[in-house]
Image (cartoon, rainbow, N blue to C red):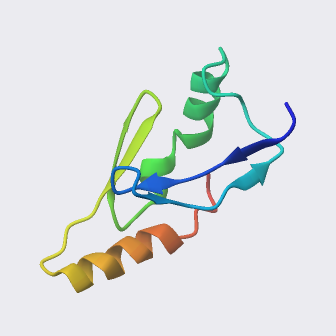
Amino acid sequence: MADRSQVVTGESEKITSKPLKTSIGVVQGSSLSNIMFSLLLNNLPECINNAHILMYADDVAAVVQAPTRELLERRLNMVAEEPIGSI
């Protein structure tokens, strides 16, 4: 498929990233999407050290706890910046 892009949304869709063009991947809803998701992200929980990773079907959540907002922000940034070289 041509002319595809992806965006990330947050805070109940109040915040949206700029679209990023993508040239590879599987169309969401295709018969391959769940299989590809499982194959590509199966080891994700073992690769992320600073969060508890929850996965179900095609959903992923990273749970991070901290006593203050500032520390929570630092820990979230650590998770987001953590290299995932073994996936």
* Residue found at the very far bottom of the displayed protein: 70
* Residue found at the very far right of the displayed protein: 2
Position of residue 5 relative to residue 74, above or below, is: above
Q: Quadrant of the N terminus?
A: top right
Position of residue 58 relative to residue 13, above or below, is: above
* Residue found at the very far left of the displayed protein: 67
Locate residue 60, reporting x and y percent.
Answer: 41, 43
Position of residue 76 relative to residue 22, above or below, is: below
**Residue at image x 42%, y 36%?**
59
Locate residue 76, reporting x and y percent.
Answer: 36, 71
| Residue 63 as seen in the image, left or right of residue 80 | left
**Residue at image x 58%, y 33%?**
37
Q: How many marks?
A: 0
* Residue found at the very far front of the displayed protein: 14
| Residue 56 as seen in the image, left or right of residue 69 | right
Locate residue 27, reporting x and y percent.
Answer: 70, 28
> Which residue occupies the foreground of this view, 12 or 38?
12
Position of residue 6 relative to residue 30, above or below, is: below
Locate residue 77, reporting x and y percent.
Answer: 42, 76
